[in-house]
Image (cartoon, rainbow, N blue to C red):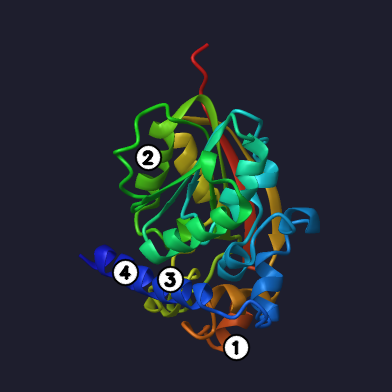
């Protein structure tokens, strides 16, 4: 199936990225554009809590942890946890009486995240599972208070299944907070086809912001609200399209990036599973 082929390509790409980050010299400078965008939504006080390993591997577009109202004692699941930046930040908020589970389908990313967690001294209440976020059925129903994801859903061939899984593992009254990039304006079919041809690009799976909300409502989520929305400059689009890094992926042409200008935005959306009463 094409979707399985795409997943394998993504897995290989991000695996190579993780291996590079793990063995990179600590004093090697960051790619300014890449890390400037990834970390733009985080305050310096948050970044200071995160080990260099996780910072180097970050490929996010928002800061779902800051908007998720995580409290001490919460159980948090981070889908597509990558190198662990949001896992570490969430664990600081749950404190020792809570727990955080990071899920990623890339084994090398899980190993990198484990290293970051060890460096941060939070091993006692952070756990990991190597799994496809479209297939997390080993997790029990009503497992989590909060589910977060950061620029991951758009890489999934079956977004509806991902949201169904989230609904299943959330406890009644639990919330999801998803940061991602979305279409905010129509684009021509031929441009969409060119974007989709690069199957591992974050831009290939763009869907309309309203479609995200429609899916969530259809699956019986409530209180669906956009918590954060920000425009993306051409250089931001180029950075996202090059994830996980320019050594691994090439962005669309400058002409295509100009055609996308003003039609793609970063967004953090929240939704709640209906409480029992």
- Residue, x 59% and y 57% (percent of image)? 119
Residue 15, percent across and down? 40, 71
**Sequence-first tag of 1 and 2:** 2
Residue located beneath label 4 in the image: 6
Q: CA distance from mark 4 to mark 3?
A: 12 Å
**Sequence-first tag of 1 and 3:** 3
**Sequence-first tag of 3 and 2:** 3
- Residue, x 53% and y 46% (percent of image)? 123
Above or below for 65 versus 243: above
Q: Is residue 52 left or right of residue 157?
A: right
- Residue, x 53% and y 70% (percent of image)? 187
Contact between labelled residues 4 and 2, with CB atoms less than 8 Å apart:
no
Residue located beneath label 1 in the image: 254
Q: Is residue 193 left or right of residue 24?
A: left
Residue located beneath label 2 in the image: 165
Above or below for 208 versus 201: above
Q: Residue furthest right?
A: 44
Residue 263's tag is none
Mark 4: few/some/many CA within 10 Å (<14, 14-19, 20+):
some
**Sequence-first tag of 1 and 4:** 4
Residue 144, percent across and down? 48, 32
Q: CA distance from mark 1 to mark 3?
A: 24 Å
- Residue 134 visible somewhere in the drawing: yes
Q: Residue furthest top?
A: 277
Q: Which numbered disc, 1 or 4, marks the residue closer to the eye?
A: 4
Q: Which numbered disc, 1 or 3, marks the residue closer to the eye?
A: 3
Residue 45, percent across and down? 79, 54
Residue located beneath label 3 in the image: 14
Above or below for 168 versus 275: below
Q: CA distance from mark 1 to mark 4?
A: 25 Å
Helix, strand or loop at label 3? It is: helix
Q: Quadrant of the N terminus?
A: bottom left
């Amino acid at each position: 199936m094409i979707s399985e082929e795409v997943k394998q390509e993504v897995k290989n790409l991000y695996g190579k990225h993780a291996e590079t980050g793990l063995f990179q010299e600590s004093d090697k400078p960051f790619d300014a554009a890449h890390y400037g965008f990834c970390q733009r939504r985080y305050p310096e006080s948050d970044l200071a809590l995160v080990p260099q390993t996780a910072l180097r591997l970050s490929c996010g577009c928002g800061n779902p942890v800051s908007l998720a109202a995580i409290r001490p004692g919460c159980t948090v699941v981070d889908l597509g946890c990558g190198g662990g930046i949001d896992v570490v930040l969430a664990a600081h908020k749950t404190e020792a009486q809570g727990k955080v589970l990071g899920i990623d389908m890339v084994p090398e990313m899980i190993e990198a995240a484990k290293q970051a967690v060890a460096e941060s001294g939070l091993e006692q209440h952070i756990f990991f599972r190597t799994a496809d976020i479209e297939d997390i059925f080993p997790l029990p129903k009503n497992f989590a208070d909060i589910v977060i994801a950061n620029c991951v859903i758009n890489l999934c061939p079956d977004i509806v299944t991902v949201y169904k899984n989230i609904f299943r593992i959330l406890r009644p009254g639990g919330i999801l907070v998803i940061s991602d990039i979305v279409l905010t304006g129509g684009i021509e079919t031929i441009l969409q086809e060119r974007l989709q041809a690069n199957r591992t690009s974050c831009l290939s799976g763009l869907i309309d912001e309203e479609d995200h909300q429609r899916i969530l409502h259809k699956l019986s989520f409530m209180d669906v609200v956009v918590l954060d929305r920000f425009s993306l400059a051409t250089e931001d689009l180029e950075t996202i399209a090059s994830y996980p890094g320019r050594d691994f992926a090439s962005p669309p042409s400058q002409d295509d990036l100009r055609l996308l200008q003003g039609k793609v935005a970063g967004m953090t959306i929240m939704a709640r599973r209906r409480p029992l009463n």
